[in-house]
Amino acid sequence: MPHAVTIATPGLQALILCGPGSSFPTFTANPDANPKALLPIANRPMVWYPLDFCYRAGITNITLICPPTAQEAIQTALNTNPFLTSLPYPRPDLLAPKDLDQNTGTAEILRLPEVQATVTDDFLVLPCDLVCELGADKLLQAWMVKSASLTDLLDDTRAENGPLKRSGGLGVWYQTKTATPIKGEETDFLATVPLPSSSVSPPKGSLFPNISKVAYSMPTDSLKDLLEEQKGFPTRHALLKKHPRVRMLTTHRDAHIYIFPHWIMDFVKENDRLETIGEDVLGWWAKAGWQKGLSTKLGLDTILGQSSTTAPNTDGKTSPVGSHTPKDSATVHPPTGSQIHDAVSASGATNLEGPVRPVIRAGDKPGQANEQNDSTIPPMLAYVHPSSSTGSTPLIRRVDTAQLLLQISLQLAKLPSIEEVGSAEAASPFAHMRKVAYPEGVKPRTTITKQDSLVADNVTVQEKTSIKECVIGANCQIGEGAKLSQCLLMDGVVVGKNCKLTKCILGKRSEVGEGCTLTECEVQENLLVEARTETKNEKFMSSSGLEATEEDLAEDDDDEDNDGNGNDDDDEDEEDDESAEE
């Protein structure tokens, strides 16, 4: 049940990027008909969560961006899905740029003409796979206090000769090493520096203590490649000269929640080599704040209406990490030498704080690294969400793998329902009205653990059935004697008699035959698992699309003909040999 729109946020737009879902091969094999944005998380379409995130903060100027091939499926869901149709007005717009395909990078999306024309003010960028219990209003408050420019906030006309556009941005990162970590979950390397201290204590519940300035940002995989290539962690002397206290994190993940000033659209448009927001836009922007001359090369001085007296670097290299020459750079090795390399290789947490003393290579010019960029680059800030082993902190998570889809769905199923709490205001924004939406469909002598399960509308459950810690979608049928534990069933699934399913994900309208025993399996939509199947860690997928084409069949026929001709020649040779012997 969506919460009512709070105080409106004038001017701020929201872009929700609806990607192809390549990390869900079992359930998005046909991304046009089954886009990732419509996969269910705890019985709600995935895209419902970022939409609700915006409405809770009063953001109503929302645009969903998807490839043209997925437009029909998403538009149909917006018009018919009960969870999406129950969202407050005004309804989100759906934009399908003609040049957007499944391989377009996130920064490249912002560069598309249709998106450039859509974004007219400061804006929020969200992924469609975001589940964020933290209120966007708190993030917006932190951004406006710590990063936004007062002249920007008051200058609605943005006249050509008006005030300088100097607002910064804000991103969100969260810890992946939780009480129930996901093996192999993606992480990002983040290096931050502290903001100037304030004499005023932050208000209770404020995000200010967890706000810092981004100095580096890249995926951890890219960091591993860098460490392997450089045999250490090199960085420019200018960074540590300007920010002697650097905090490095390797087990956190970029939530892809970005609050951006409007000038970022110009920055992306002018730098056509930027492909992704997380690695390229943030990486270059953060580096421009401390590397001498980089803001001029990136065109930031012009975009921000500033003039810089600093000369560009002589090496001509502007890579966010690892560009070094003896004239203007230094190799820095944090304390304990290979500590970062060992920690990253072991996928452990690296949190190095304190002064880092640079080691200057021979040939460095004394004092050259002391020069600082005269241009004032607006800061890109990071909110690093604190983790809690007790689960008391609001949930922030990206759901972009099948394992995360199952884990987060089961986690949300444990939330008390609105019926149990007594009112929607006191319940979690992700709470359902009731744990079992259609109790009339549940036969006697069944076991359903309501404290950790969700059962949607029109679900029929036969006798002697056990459902523990599961999420059951609408219109499912559970046969007599079935036992389900830690499973996610999408809409319309049929489970036969005496089946035993553990940690399984079953796609829409799939069917599991009688007497099956499945553990940690995935079943594609509309697929039948034959009766009495027993298996573990299996992905049941249709062979559709794997059939041989006419060209393949023609090539096979040619090969057979060639093989046949070759055999005939061999037979003739053998006959000649026999004649010679005679």
Image: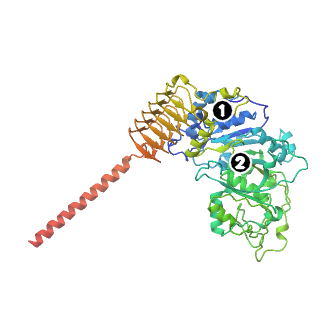
Where 339 sits versus 195, above or below? below
* Residue that numbered label 2 is attached to: 387
Judge from the rendering whether residue 297 lies leftward or rightward of residue 31; answer left or right. right
Residue at (55, 26) in percent of width and height: 457
Separation of residues labelled 1 and 2 (CA atoms): 21 Å
Judge from the rendering whether residue 292 lies leftward or rightward of residue 118; answer left or right. right
Way the structure is coloured: rainbow
Residue 570 placed where, x, y %? 21, 64
Under mark 2, the amino acid is Ser
Residue 215 placed where, x, y %? 76, 57
Q: Could one spot residue 59 in this view of the protein?
A: no
Q: Secondary structure at mark 1?
A: loop
Residue 318: quadrant of the picture:
bottom right
* Residue that numbered label 1 is attached to: 416
Residue 218 placed where, x, y %? 68, 56
Instruction: Tell me if mark 1 has few (under 14), some (14-19) or many (20+) residues whose alpha carbon lies within 10 angstroms of its own.
Output: many
Q: Residue furthest bottom?
A: 362
Where 14 sits versus 209, above or below? above
Q: Residue furthest front?
A: 445
- Residue 103 got which mark? none
Q: Quadrant of the C terminus?
A: bottom left
Q: Could one spot residue 91 in this view of the protein?
A: yes
Q: Nearer the viewer, residue 448 or 569?
A: 448
Q: Secondary structure at mark 2?
A: loop
Q: Nearer the viewer, residue 304 or 1?
A: 1
Residue at (53, 22) in percent of width and height: 440
Task: Say which label, 1 or 2, has the lower sequence index.
Answer: 2
Q: Residue furthest top?
A: 440
Count of number-bearing discs: 2
